[in-house]
């Protein structure tokens, strides 16, 4: 099984920390955020991971190399000067990911979720990990029912953790789902993944699970500091 780690974002809310360091390379608990993911992926037998890059793309390979230290083969999907958003980034990386289901993880989260709990193949087009709504996102993203199906709306709304298993077919008809929108005229195109997921949910093609453990979306310097304190690293610098 292969994996994709989203690492192309500019991290604008994290500045000045991200002016010289991409957000996934910021250290927490003594190692870069992205390394936590690489270690956990390697632990469940993933042997090839793709890192998509844009902002400060040249910083990743010197920091991570070819992945051999984790027993992985790392490949890089460079998107150019501007990130392609999650949907465009996934589409751009598909030639490196192949035809089989793959894991995708946001490079700017920290979570104690055990990747071994993910299905090797989703029932439908995607399987998402959801978490309790954090204070900065109280309304959540999607609803999870008692049968493990994920819906665009509902009473039991949770927040998408940025961890999932996807079939490449999720992107087959992206143009019809997204329609004419800013970024879609680019080559390669830029668009968000969420509309494709909502369309798949309406077709009953998305399952999920509720992770009740620790999870942080490292979106601000304050949340980075809180995570570092939680992991026993009190330093404020990058």
Image: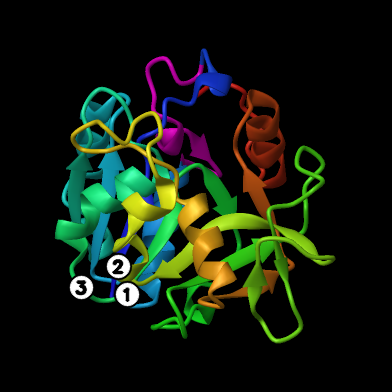
Q: Where is residue 102 in the image (x, y as percent from the top left)?
A: 33, 69
Q: Is residue 21 magenta?
A: yes
Q: How many labels does the image show?
A: 3
Q: How far apart are marks 1 and 3 (CA)?
A: 7 Å
Q: Which mark is residue 168?
A: 2
The residue wearing badge 3 is: 99
* Residue at x 74% of width, y 77% of height: 145
Q: How crowded is mark 2: few (under 14 residues within 10 Å), some or many (20 or more)?
A: some
Q: Is residue 137 above or below residue 164?
A: above
Which region of the structure is painted magenta?
A: 17-31
Q: Quadrant of residue 43?
A: bottom left
Q: Name the one closer to the observer, 227 or 103.
A: 103
Callout 1: helix, strand or loop?
loop
Residue 84 in percent (x, y) is at 33, 36
Where residue 233 appears, as percent x and y from the top left, is 63, 37
Residue 18 in view here:
yes
* Residue 215 is one of the magenta-drawn residues: no
Quarter of the image containing the N terminus? bottom left
Q: Mark 1 points at which residue?
A: 101
Q: Does 32 sit above or below residue 4?
A: above
């Amino acid at each position: 099984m292969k994996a994709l780690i989203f690492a192309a974002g500019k991290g604008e809310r994290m500045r000045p920390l991200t002016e010289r360091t991409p957000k996934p390379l910021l250290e927490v608990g003594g190692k870069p955020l992205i390394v936590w993911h690489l270690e956990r992926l390697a632990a469940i037998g993933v042997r090839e991971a793709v890192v998509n890059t844009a902002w400060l793309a040249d910083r990743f390979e010197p920091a991570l190399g070819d992945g051999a230290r984790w027993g992985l083969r790392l490949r890089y999907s460079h998107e150019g000067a501007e990130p392609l958003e999650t949907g465009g980034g996934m589409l751009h990386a598909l030639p490196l990911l192949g035809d089989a289901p793959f894991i995708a993880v946001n490079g700017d989260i920290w979570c104690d979720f055990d990747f071994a709990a993910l299905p090797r193949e989703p029932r439908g087009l995607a399987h998402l990990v959801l978490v309790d709504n954090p204070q900065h996102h109280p309304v959540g993203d999607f609803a999870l029912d008692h049968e493990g199906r994920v819906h665009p709306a509902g009473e039991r709304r949770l927040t998408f953790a940025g961890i999932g298993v996807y079939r490449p077919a999720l992107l087959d008809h992206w143009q019809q789902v997204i329609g004419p929108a800013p970024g879609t005229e680019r080559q390669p195109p830029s668009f968000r993944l969420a509309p494709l997921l909502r369309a798949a949910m309406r077709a009953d093609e998305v399952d999920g699970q509720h992770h009740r453990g620790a999870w942080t979306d490292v979106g601000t310097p304050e949340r980075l500091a809180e995570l570092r304190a939680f992991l026993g690293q009190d330093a404020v610098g990058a």
